[in-house]
Image (tube, grey):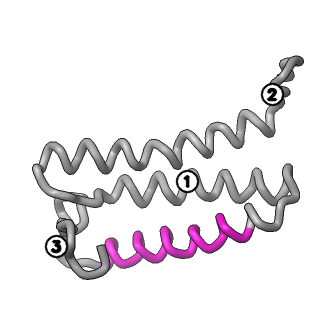
Amino acid sequence: MTVDGPLLVNAWVAFGILGQALFASRFIVQWLVSERRKESTVPVAFWCLSLAGGAILFVYASWYRHDPVFTIGQSVGLVVYARNLMLIRRAPANAGGEVAPQRAGAAGA
């Protein structure tokens, strides 16, 4: 798939756009869940979208762009996202699929 003009779109660029869309959608998911609960909440879906989008962006940055800055930035994030999902999976009471609420001004927020 190639489109000529000011924006060259090929399969790699489409792949990168998919990763960016997944990564950006995590904020919308977090916002909607928080609005529904009327408190700041980080749902498990936030971390899943972070991991999926970050992994796609990592592949895009390293294999297509050959950009070490972009690649390193994404690789560090992937460790954080995977670790958060591991911690959530180990939590004994995670039936609701959401992390404990994070209130504004709380330590670590």
Q: Secondary structure at mark 3?
A: loop
Identify the element where label 2 is drawn.
Answer: loop
Q: CA distance from mark 3 to mark 1?
A: 24 Å
Say whether residue 87 is magenta.
yes
> Mark number for residue 93?
3
Front disc: 3 or 1 = 1
Q: Residue at x 33, y 72 (%)?
A: 89
Q: Which residue is the site of mark 1?
A: 52
> What percent of the width, then of the height, locates residue 23?
52, 49
Q: Quadrant of residue 103?
A: bottom left
Q: Which residue is mark 2?
A: 9
Instruction: Give x and y (percent) for residue 52.
Output: 55, 53
Q: Earlier in the sequence, mark 1 or mark 2?
A: 2
Q: Find residue 1 and report its horizontal and vertical position in percent.
A: 83, 23
Q: Would you identify the image quadrant in which residue 100 lies?
A: bottom left
**Label located before the other in sequence (3 or 1):** 1
Counting labels gives 3
- Tag 1 and tag 2, C-beta contact below 8 Å: no
Q: Secondary structure at mark 1?
A: helix
Mark 2 → mark 3, Cα distance in angstroms: 45 Å
Taking the spot 36% from the left edge, 53% from the top edge, the residue there is 45
- Give me the C-alpha separation between circle 1 and circle 2: 21 Å
Range covered by the magenta-colored residues: 72-90
Q: Residues within 10 Å of mark 1 (few under 14, many from 20)?
A: some
